Image: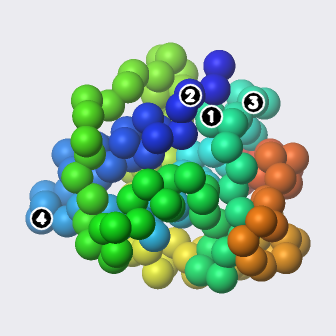
Amino acid sequence: MAYPVLSIANKILAYGAAANDEGELFSNMKLQKLLYYVQGFHIAVFNRPLFNEDIEAWMYGPVVPAVYEYYQENGNKGIMPNEKPITLEAEEESLFNEVLRIYGNYSAIGLMNFTHNEMPWQSTPTGKGHIITKEKLGEFFHTRLA
């Protein structure tokens, strides 16, 4: 089952707010990269997307346009979650938390640099409307599974 993308975004923001001892909230840019990673690993492990919305290859890395626009007014400031986070199925929750445990510690720029060196972003033309396909995500992240 795919979840609403804004619910997944809120769950990522809630994770950041709860896990970060210094109170540093995730920015929209960091949120976008984390959406890419949770989606990619979810497709690789479960052979289905975590959310249905497309991820596009923008200049600064992968972006889910609807989520970007929703949080755009925050600029580069940290974003507070706006609701209680949803709970995923047990195996999905475990994977979600593991991906955020690993990637959530990197800066937005660090994550952008990672994505710029990965096949899904490199093999997609850069710019609004250029979709990083779920097939590319699945293929690439399948190679990243231990």
First in sequence, mark 4 or 3: give its number. 4
* Front residue (pair 6, 114): 6
Q: Amino acid at mark 4?
A: Glu
- How far apart are the two marked residues, 4 and 2, measured between alpha carbons? 30 Å
Question: Which residue is located at x 66 percent, y 82 percent?
Answer: 59
> How many numbered callouts?
4
Tell me whether circle 2 and circle 1 mark residues in contact (CB < 8 Å).
Answer: yes
121, above or below 80, in the image: below
Tell me whether circle 4 and circle 2 mark residues in contact (CB < 8 Å).
Answer: no
Provide the secondary structure element on which disc 4 rests.
loop
Residue named by callout 3: 48
Q: Amino acid at mark 2?
A: Tyr
Residue named by callout 1: 50
Residue named by callout 4: 22
Instruction: Find residue 126 and report its horizontal and vertical position in percent.
Output: 77, 79
Q: Categorize mark 1 by other alpha carbons within 10 Å: few (<14), some (14-19), many (20+).
A: many
Residue named by callout 2: 3
Closer to the eye: label 1 or 4: 1
Instruction: Find residue 64 and report its horizontal and vertical position in percent.
Output: 60, 56
Question: Which residue is located at x 25 percent, y 29 percent?
Answer: 84
Q: Is residue 129 left or right of residue 5?
A: right
Provide the secondary structure element on which disc 3 rests.
loop
Q: Categorize mark 3 by other alpha carbons within 10 Å: few (<14), some (14-19), many (20+).
A: some
69, above or below 6, in the image: below
119, above or below 17, in the image: below
